[in-house]
Image (cartoon, helix red, strand yellow):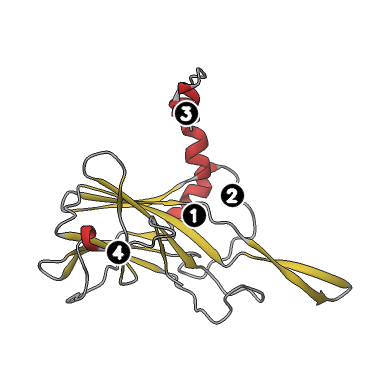
Amino acid sequence: MLTELGDCGFHFDPAWFAPHFEFRFPKVGNVNVDGMVLTLRNALEPWHVMGEEGAVGGTVRYVDSSLERIEVHVSGLNPSRHSVTVNGQSLPLQPTGVAGEWVASVRYKAWNPPSALHPTIGVHAPLTLDIVDTWMKRSLGGCQYHVAHPGGRNYDTFPVNAYEAESRRLARFFRMGHTPGRMTGVQPALSVPASREFPFTLDLR
């Protein structure tokens, strides 16, 4: 968008919007595996308004907040040999235009609210991400991302500042817990078929 505005004569320095980007798409964590860097960020996911339902004192319309999305960015990947999987599913990685950089998003069910569009689909959390060597058929390493605190802690207050919010996100990210053992059926990143409707997204539903 900034490039399009610049082409029309309205020039904005991208550095001005860096704080906005970090606020809206906060970094969850990153892991380095054999020179390959995998980074997770929170991404946008629309929540749909459900139909009217009867409740105590009147009629309500719930919002389906069960779905969330994360961005997976990986650099240093050999797309003809390596692949990135989420809970065993291969990511449809797409090039960013920078050599050696690939990106994709993951849509997943984070929790089971009482009213949702897909009540029969189970929760996908925690997400286990693996960088897979398809030649050796094993995971070289990876990470885990939990939607809630893995110890069951429930925060009673909002974070007082960005540092506390970041610490809460870091408490849900682990640079361990990748899939052990032999991994078969995983295709290299170049061979992973992408959805024609959403080529950048892996929908775990």
Q: Which numbered dot is residue 141?
A: none
Is 82 or 15 nearer to us in this picture?
Answer: 82
Residues at marks 4 and 2 touching, judged by CB atoms closer than 8 Å = no
Is 36 or 120 nearer to us in this picture?
Answer: 120
Rounded to the nearest whole Å, what is the CA distance between mark 4 and mark 2?
40 Å
Rounded to the nearest whole Å, what is the CA distance between mark 2 and mark 3?
36 Å
Disc 4: which residue: 193
Mark 2 nearby-residue class (10 Å; few <14, some 14–19, many ≥20): few
Disc 1: which residue: 168
Specify which label sits upstream in the sequence, 4 or 3: 3
Q: Quadrant of residue 52?
A: bottom right
Disc 2: which residue: 159
Q: Amino acid at mark 4?
A: Pro
Mark 4 nearby-residue class (10 Å; few <14, some 14–19, many ≥20): few
Instruction: List x then y, in percent, for residue 71.
Output: 41, 53
Query: Residue at left 15%, top 57%?
Result: 80
Rounded to the nearest whole Å, what is the CA distance between mark 4 and mark 3?
31 Å
Disc 3: which residue: 4
Specify which label sits upstream in the sequence, 2 or 3: 3
Query: Residue at left 45%, top 22%?
Result: 7
Q: Amino acid at mark 1?
A: Arg
Specify which label sits upstream in the sequence, 1 or 3: 3
Residues at marks 1 and 4 touching, judged by CB atoms closer than 8 Å = no
Q: Residue furthest top?
A: 9
Q: Amino acid at mark 3?
A: Glu
Q: Residue furthest front?
A: 196
